[in-house]
Amino acid sequence: MLLEVRNIRKSFADKRVLEDISFEVRSSQAFGLLGRNGAGKTTLIRIIMGVFPANEGEVLIDGKPIDYETTKIGYLPEERGLYARKKIIDQLIYFAELKGLSKARAIQSIDYWLDRLDMSEYRNKRLDTLSKGNQQKIQLITALVHNPDLIILDEPFSGLDPVNAALIKGIVSQQIQEGKIVLFSSHQMNYVEEFCDNVGIVDHGHMVLRGNLHQIKREYERNKLVVSSTQAQNIIGDCKGISDIVSAIPMDEYKVMLTLTSSGKKKEIMQKLSLAYDIDEMAVYEPSLNDIFIEYAGGTDDEVEEGGDVK
Amino acid sequence: MKQFKTIMNFELMNFFKNKIFIGITVFLMLLVAIVLFIPRIVDATSQGEEPTPIDPNDLPVVIVTAPNDVMGLVLQDVLQQAFEGSYRVEFTHDDAQSIETLITLGAASRAFAFEDWTVYTYYVKNISISDYATAVVDGVIQNLYRLNSMVSAGMTPEQAQEIMSIAPTHETINLGVDQTNNFLYTYIMVIALFMIIMLYGQMVASNVASEKSTRAMELLVTSAKPISMMFGKVLAACAAGLVQIALIFGSAIVFYRLNESYWASDEIISSLFNIPPELLIYMLVFFLLGFLLYAFMYGAIGSTASKLEDINTAVMPITFIFIIAYILVIFSLASGSVDNVGMVIFSYVPFTSPMAMFARLAMSVVAWWEIAISIGILVATVVTVGILAARIYRAGVLLYGTKPTFKEMFKMLRN
C-alpha cells in the first residue's frame, strides 16, 4: 500500500496554513513528520484523515483518492482525551464500534491490546482513576483496536516512563513490520531516527526538507571531524598553524570539532593527527536529526500564533 | 448510518445509566403515585370508624347581640341555620368591650353586633384569607329583610318564600372548547414542554462542550462524521426526554386508573386524565419539533464553547427567546384569551409555536389549516436549523480558544 500526499494547500480564512505539501509512504515504512509547534502538522494530519478538505491537492492510496470507508486509519492525537468518567471497556468499545467493528470483535481486540499493554486489570475501572501514562496507553488502544492500515501517531512517547516507552516502541516496530504505514510526528528526534527511514520537515506551512534520513545526512559535506583526545586542548592550539583546517571548536574538555577546507583533505589530516597525538576516537561528523531540524526549522523565531495549529 | 446508530446508542446509554437521570425519574414517579393514592389511603384509614356526630357544644361560638330580645332571637335562629355544623350561635347581651375581651381570649371565635336589621359590626380575632362569614350573614339578613318587606306589603309568607327560592334552570351549548376542563392539562403540558426542552437542551450543549474540553473530540471528529455526532446526540436526548415523560405520565395514568373511583368526585383531577387523544398527538408533534429545534441550537452553541463554564453565557440568547415565549403563553393562558394578537403571531413563529400553537388549539378553536401552516413552518425551520447547526458544529468542535463572534459563525455557515 502506498500513501501519497500531493501538493496540499490549505488556508483558513485569509491565513495560509499549508503550501504545496507532498510526500509518500509505503507499507512497512514510517515517515517522520517534523515541524515546530504551529507549523501545520495537525492541519496536515486532519486533511489526510478527511476531517476537512484541502483547498488544493490530493491524498491518494495506491494512486486513487483515499476512500475512508475502506482505508482504516488509526490516530493517536497529540491532545489526548477520552471520557474521563466512563468505564474504560465501555468507551473502548464505543470507539471501536465507531471504527466499524462489531461489538464482539471489538471486545476481542480490546482484550488483546489491554493484555499486550499490561492494562487488563484496569478494564472495568473509570478512566480518571488511571495515571497519565496509563491513560495514554488506553488512548493508544483506540488507535490500534481496528487493525488500521495507516497509523498516525502524534507524540506517542511524551509523558511515558522508560519501561512504558520501551513497551510502546516494541508495539510500533511490530506494526511497521506487519506492513502498516506509520506517520510519526514527534519532537523527540531520537525516536524519529529510530523508526523513520524518511522524514519531512514542515516549517511555516512549507515542506522545507524531505527525503531519506541517511541520504540527507550523507549529503552534508563530510568535511568535519570530531576528535576525542586527552590532548584536545593541544590540538586546538596547534591547529591554528595548519592551513587545511578552517576552524577548531572545542565541544567539551576532551573533544574538538575540526572543519576542513574540503572533504578531500580528510585522510591526510586524520593521518597527521593520529601520528602527532594520543587519539581516543576520531570520526567524520554526521549531523543528528536534531541538528538538521534546528537548521531547517529553527531559522526565524516568530512563533506561529497560538491556535493556528488546531483549527 | 451505522455510526449514527452507534453514537445514538452510546448517548442514550449515558442517560439511562446516569444516576441523576434515574433518580429524578423515579422520584417524580413516586411523587405522582403518592398524590394519586392519597384519597384511597385517606378512605382506608377512616373506614370502620363511624363518623361521630359532632357535639354542638364543641363547636366554636359565634356571639350575636341585638338592640332587643325579639330581634336577637330571630337572628340567632337564622344564623344558626346558616352556620349549622360549623359554629354554635349564641344570643347574648354583651357590650362591645366584653365582646372584644371574649374574642381576644378565644372564648368566642367571632361576633356580630346588630344595631338594626341591616346594620351590624363584625368582630374577629384574625381575618383569614377565606373569611366568608360576613358574606354569609349579609345573604341571610338580605333574605330576611326582603321576606319581611314582601310580607308587610301584603303577601303571604308562602308566596314570599316562593319568590325568594326561585331557581332558574339553564342549558349550555358550547360551540368551542371547554376551558374550565382543559386549562389544567394545558398548563401542565406547556410547563412540561418548557422544562424538558430547557433541561435537555442545556444537557446537549454541555455534553458537546465537555467532549471538547476533555479533548475526546480530537478522536471523535476523526472517527465519526460531525453530522452523525450532532444528530446522534440530539436524537438520543430527545428519546431520553420522551422516555422520561412517558414513564412519569404513564405511571400517573396507571395510578389514576387504579384509584379512579376515589377521584370520581374531583372534577379537576378527572378532567386531567380525560385528555382528548388528538391533543396528546399534537402534544407529541409539537414536543418533538420544538425539542429538535432547540436541541440543534443548543448543540451548535455547545460546539463553539471551549470550556464548560462558557456554556451558560453562550446559550443565554436562546434561553431568553424561549423564556419570553413561555411567559407570554402562560400569561395568555391565565387571562383566558389565548387568541390574542401576540399568541396568534407566536403560534406561527417557529421558536415559539410549539408552546403557543399547542396552547391555542387546546384552549380555543383553531382551523386545521392554521395548525398545518404552523407545523409546516416549524418542520422547515427544524430542517434548516439542523443543517446549519451541523455546519457550525463541524467547524466549532475544532475551534479552541476565543469564542467565535456571530460574524465568524456566519462564515462557518458558508464554508
Image (cartoon, rainbow, N blue to C red):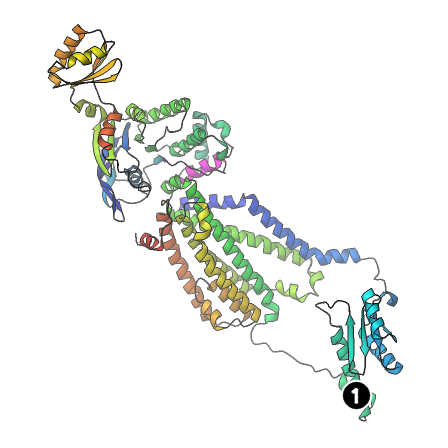
- Density class for disc 1 (Cα within 10 Å; few <14, some 14-19, many ≥20) is some
* Residue in front for this viewpoint, A36 or A114: A36
In x, y percent, where is residue B367? Answer: 48, 72
In magenta stretch: residue A90: yes
x and y, in percent, of residue A70 in the image: 32, 39
- Say if A27 sits above or below B30 in the image: above
Report x, y in % for residue B233.
45, 48
Indicate whether residue B255 is drawn in magenta: no
Q: Determine the secondary structure under disc 1.
A: helix
Q: Is residue B328 left or right of residue A242?
A: right
Identity, as a three-letter code, of the amino acid under mark 1: Ala
Whether residue B238 is visible here, answered yes or no, is no
Relative side of B207 to B38, left or right:
left
Seen at 79% across and 86% down, the residue is: B147
| Chain label for disc 1 | B
Viewer can see residue B127:
yes
Which quarter shows the C terminus of chain A? top left
Is B176 on the left-hand or right-hand side of B152?
A: left
Residue range (magenta): A78-101
Residue in the picture at 74% in, 84% down: B166
Return the residue nearer the eye: B123 or B275.
Answer: B123
| Residue bearing the label numbered 1 | B160
Q: How many marks?
A: 1
Q: Position of residue B143 (x, y in %)?
A: 77, 83
Q: Which quadrant does the N terminus of chain A fall into?
A: top left
Picture quadrant where residue B105 is located: bottom right
Task: Choose top left, top right, bottom left or bottom right for residue A67.
Answer: top left
Horizontal side of residue B54 vs B233, given as left or right: right
Q: Is residue B283 above or below residue A285?
A: below
